[in-house]
Amino acid sequence: MSTNYKINSPKVIHETIDGEVVVVNLDEKDYYSLLKVAADIWNRIERGISKENIIAELSQQYNHNCEEIESSINSFLKELELEQLIMLTTNNVLTSKSGYNTTIQTQVTQAKLEFEPPILEKFTNMKDSP
């Protein structure tokens, strides 16, 4: 059984600008910046990729200990949930093994990037706005 998340819309909106994902929680008036691995994870959540496949793909894409990658991704997903930016879903948008295998094979042929644990950078200065 796979674990899938979805973006908590309509209360959460997001935009990717030059590789940075800017996420806004409209109810809480907080906004967030996601860079590098954090942006990679968000983009995969947006595409409906399961947690297990996110871990598998990033373990192939990044040069680092697989257990530490998995732990970092799990912690980051928990943080996104606690901030109410994502939520568990029962939809399995990407269930085809062929789509998953194609992604992995493409990434294996590329040079691996250095892994940096994903960071959820939070800004609360919108709360002062009327």
Image (cartoon, grey):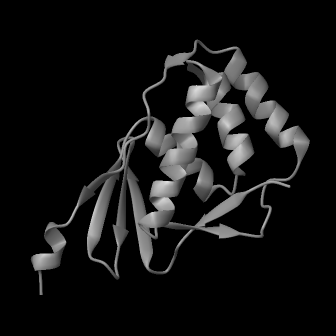
In this view, the residue in front, 116 or 16, is 116
* Residue at 27%, 57% in the rendered image: 122
For residue 16, above or below residue 84: above
For residue 129, above or below residue 55: below
Rendered location of residue 77, percent (x, y): 53, 53
Rendered location of residue 64, percent (x, y): 55, 18
Left or right of 123 on screen, residue 49: right
Name the quarter where the C terminus is drawn.
bottom left
Residue 26 lies in quadrant: bottom left
Left or right of 30 on screen, residue 4: right
Q: How many marks?
A: 0
For residue 118, above or below residue 60: below
Rendered location of residue 115, percent (x, y): 48, 23
Left or right of 55 on screen, residue 127: left
Residue 71 lies in quadrant: top right
Residue that sits furthest to the right in the current view: 97
In this view, the residue in front, 91 or 79, is 79
* Residue at 60%, 55% in the rendered image: 45
Name the quarter where the N terminus is drawn.
bottom right
Rendered location of residue 53, percent (x, y): 73, 42
For residue 68, above or below residue 50: above
* Residue at 17%, 77% in the rendered image: 127
Residue that sits furthest to the bottom in the current view: 130
* Residue at 45%, 56% in the rendered image: 79
